[in-house]
Amino acid sequence: MISRRIIVLALLTAGLGTAPAHPASGQIYPSRPITMVVPFGTGGPTDTIGRLMAEGMRVSLGQPVIIENVAGASGSVGVGRVARASPDGYTLSYGAWVTHVVNPAVYPLPYDVLEDFAPVALIASTPWLIVAKKAMPADDLKGLIAWLKANPDKASAGTTGVGTPGHVGGVLFQVATGTRFQFVPYRSSGPVVQDLLSGQIDLAVLDPVTSLPQLRAGKIKAYAVTAEKRLAAAPDIATVDDAGLPGLHLAPWHSIWVPKGTPRDVVAKLNAAVVDALADQTIRRRIADQGMEIPLPEQQTPEALAAFHKAEIEKWWPIIKAANIKGE
């Protein structure tokens, strides 16, 4: 007669023999490389800071974070790709003010920025600069405004597309000053700078990442920073308030998102990797060198990004629609 002990041992042995060696549910995240989609071309501020964050997050996650540039339609092509991705934490969206605030106001998008993404963390924000080619005769902001008024529709301003910070900033500048000039769209900020250097365009509202190196080299002029306080990376540049155009404040921001439905523990691990990266002194210094400001620790949580995002939409959508900025 077979004893109870032998039957139990037999059942246990059978169970062990049929159990999967590496159950999918037991895999530790992340177990393979992660893709971070940057929705703009290489060389611009989003790409620059995105790559910096990817390298910093790699340390905490123990897996490579691979940058994939997917440009098009002011970033909506790349963001749309992430919206359709599997919510498993292996496809991230490196988002920005333009992709998650402006685009929904100017484009008919196949996704909802509030409903189709889960926030991970706010990375940094930065006011932009009003700059011009070296040969521009004006020496200060008031002089630039006077020159533009004396030469209506003759100047050209480079942007990286409809609804981008350079375009929105340029439209707000026109409204505030009563000036008129033509907008010239580019696919990324790199070509804007090149044509500014060669004199093919006259001015631009540009990010510090691409404009400060040219300014420090004496190749372009900077008239003001679009903020209440001066940039730590360029304290000699006046604010718009001090330069004679108070209230023209524009400080686009960067953030990381995942598809809605991504498990909370995965979001938490990604957020921890961002927080660790932003605490690294080398990364903090490199972000500051780009004229960007890192949010306080309490502003780096997913919940804080969700609240901030909603507030930004409530602030900017009426302004963008009142200015009649529309996608082409």
Image: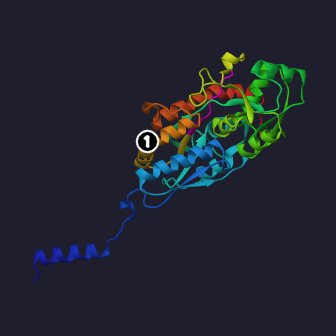
Q: Would you place residue 299 above or below residue 176 in this image?
A: below
Where, by quadrant of the figure, is residue 289 drawn?
top right
On whether residue 67 falls in the magenta region, the answer is no
On whether residue 252 falls in the magenta region, the answer is yes
User: Which is the main secondary structure of the residues drawn in magenta?
Assistant: loop
Nearer-the-camera pick, 53 or 196: 196
Residue 186, position as x, y percentages in the image: 77, 44
Q: Residue furthest bottom?
A: 1
Residue on which disc 1 sits: 280
Q: Residue at x 61, y 29 (%)?
A: 234
Q: Would you place residue 99 above or below residue 69 in this image?
A: above
Residue 212, position as x, y percentages in the image: 65, 36
Where, by quadrant of the figure, is residue 180 drawn?
top right
Residue 23, position as x, y percentages in the image: 37, 65
Local SS, label 1: loop
Q: Would you place residue 227 above or below residue 208 in this image?
A: above
